[in-house]
Amino acid sequence: MKQLEGKVAVITGAASGIGRALAVACAAEGMKLVLADVDGDGLSATGELMPRGIAVRTTRCDVSKIKAVERLAELAFGDFGNVHLLFNNAGVAALGPVWSATPEDWQWVLGVNLLGVANGIVSFVPRMMAAGEDGHIVNTASGAGLTAVPGSGVYCASKHAVVALSECLAKDLELAGSELKVNVLCPSLVKTAIADSGRHRPVHLASTNPDSAPYDRRVRAGMEASEVSAGDVARMTLQAIRDDQFYILPHPAVRLRVEERLRKILGDHKPLQTDGHVAPKDEP
Ligand SMILES: NC(=O)c1ccc[n+]([C@@H]2O[C@H](COP(=O)([O-])OP(=O)(O)OC[C@H]3O[C@@H](n4cnc5c(N)ncnc54)[C@H](O)[C@@H]3O)[C@@H](O)[C@H]2O)c1
């Protein structure tokens, strides 16, 4: 899709980080925006960044709840008549070895990261198809959706599922003869508030992995050192939409890890290594 001006974008997780940067980038293109998040104050702060003259609706929405996402679709189509870019971006992280992950870690992370994307697809895609115009569904996965990151089993499982779901969606749309396209965004570490994503964790899902601390410290340090900003990710994402590039890999390191993983899958039978990600035994 080359022309973005005047088109409509819906962005989940728009109160912070990559979602906020996507909102700023879409507004700079002159798009109309529907911004959704569980964080009302953060949404207001994003709304204040929008240039004058841009049509913006902000609304509270928990993407893990299908009824809430259905209401979001009704609001977006009701207000603007169509949606051209759907960014299924809201996400959370829980860290620690897989064997000490709690049932609540699984329910929360899969609920937001995987069901949030599925709910977006189910609620928006039939309406976007019926509108018969060009459009993109952009799902935020992660580099952790293409490779394995130690201490991130639950998160990786959710993000690998988002990559697979995105690939299937693209094939389903093509088979149905739809003009809608799909992109899957797979960044490595970017400095955002995701290390503090527990700030909006529901109380009934509060019980978390007791062994997350060393992984958490390493992720925070990696984010601080990251040379790719949320703004960079947003710019690359809009360019990928224009170029109709399915996989979006803002960090060159992810490309290298994907190549190594594929080599192993296809016959290099050396043991899997941690790729220097996280080695809790090195921690103080
Ligand atoms: N920051 C990174 O290093 C990184 C790397 C790869 C992928 N990602 C992915 O990028 C996406 C955006 O994360 P971010 O890094 O900007 O983090 P962030 O915490 O800054 O933003 C995430 C937003 O999602 C919202 N959110 C959380 N639960 C929600 C729910 N149930 N319903 C609606 N909104 C909800 C939060 O309130 C927050 O505003 C996520 O899917 C994340 O997994 C981030």
Image: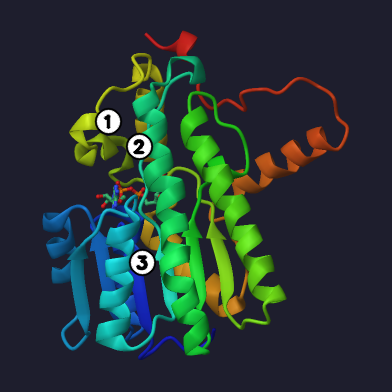
Residue displayed at 24% across by 59% down: 61
Residue displayed at 32% across by 86% down: 30
Q: Secondary structure at mark 3?
A: helix
The quadrant of the picture occupied by the C terminus is top left
From the image, state whether disc 3 or disc 1 is nearer to you.
1
Amino acid type at mark 2: Trp
Residue 178: horizontal and vertical position, in percent? Answer: 62, 81
Q: Secondary structure at mark 1?
A: helix
Q: Splitting the image into 4 quarters, where does residue 22 fall?
A: bottom left
Neighbours of disc 1 within 10 Å: few (<14), some (14-19), many (20+): some
Instruction: Name the foreground residue: 219 vs 153.
Output: 153
- From the viewer's perspective, is residue 72 above or below residue 219? below
Q: Secondary structure at mark 2?
A: helix
The mark found on residue 82 in the picture is none
The residue that mark 2 highlights is 108
Per the model, the C-alpha gap separating discs 3 and 1 is 29 Å
Amino acid type at mark 3: Leu
Is 128 on the left-hand or right-hand side of 261? left
The residue that mark 1 highlights is 205
Is 100 on the left-hand or right-hand side of 42? right
The residue that mark 3 highlights is 22
Of the two numbered discs 3 and 2 on the same chain, state the one appearing first in sequence.
3
Instruction: Name the foreground residue: 165 vs 261.
Output: 165
Residue 15: horizontal and vertical position, in percent? Answer: 23, 57
Neighbours of disc 2 within 10 Å: few (<14), some (14-19), many (20+): many
